[in-house]
Amino acid sequence: MVTRRARMRGYTLLEVVIAMAVFGMFLLIVTMLTSEMRNLEKRMPVDFMSHPQVAAVLSRLRRDVEDVHGANPYPTNAGSYSQTPQTLILESVQPNGGLQTIVWDFSSPGVAVRHATNVGITTDWTARGLPPEFSNQFAIDAIDIPGRPYGVRVTARDQKGRIAIDQLFQPRAHD
């Protein structure tokens, strides 16, 4: 005779099958996610956004573009610089009321330079150690959005010519 206590030990076949099915579904989801990540990595092998210098340059450039103000926030030239796909010139009004001219220069490989001139005083900020592909395949362009000031489109390509960065920075709306 089998006692009640002996019957309660272990799992039934149905419980084991359900547990295996749940575990199998979990493994299937993890496998699918891993393969999708691998396919994405093959398509875009250079991740400029994970490079700390590139992230610093893009975040500072974004802030500068968001702060532009005035009827012509993108002058055609400033000092010896002129607007090119490797150079961005913009003007912003500072909180103290002064006008600041900012020049972003990406013409040197591996280096991004920001020159800011405010009432004759120039300050420079330089990012060194950028990936060479970032500087060689980097371009700045203007984007026209109806009813808004021109936006700035930043693109960069990897060594094989595939797009690695495609960002659009839009100035804030001012009263």
Image (tube, rainbow, N blue to C red):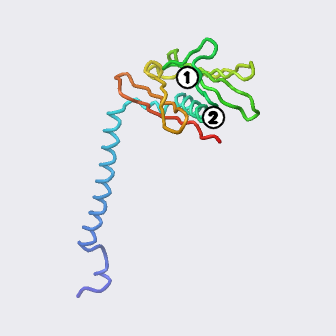
Whether residue 127 is situated above or below residue 151 in the rendered picture:
above
Q: What residue is pinned by disc 2?
A: 67
SS at mark 2 in the image: loop
Q: What residue is pinned by disc 1?
A: 88
Whether residue 111 is situated above or below residue 70 in the rendered picture:
above
Marks 1/2 in contact by CB < 8 Å: the verdict is no
Q: Position of 98 compared to 85: left or right?
A: right
Task: Quadrant for residue 91, please give it.
Answer: top right
Image point (69%, 21%), residue name: 117
| Relative image position of residue 89 (x, y in whole percent) | 59, 22
Whether residue 86 is situated above or below residue 73 in the rendered picture:
above
| Relative image position of residue 102 (x, y in whole percent) | 63, 24
161 and 103: which one is in front? 103
Q: Gap in Å between the C-alphas at discs 1 and 2?
A: 14 Å
Q: Amino acid at mark 2?
A: Asp
How packed is label 1: few (under 14 Cα within 10 Å), some, or many (20 or more)? many
Task: Quadrant for residue 163, please give it.
Answer: top left
Q: Is residue 110 visible?
A: no
First of labels 1, 2 by sequence position: 2
Q: Split into 4 quadrants, where in the image is the N terminus? A: bottom left
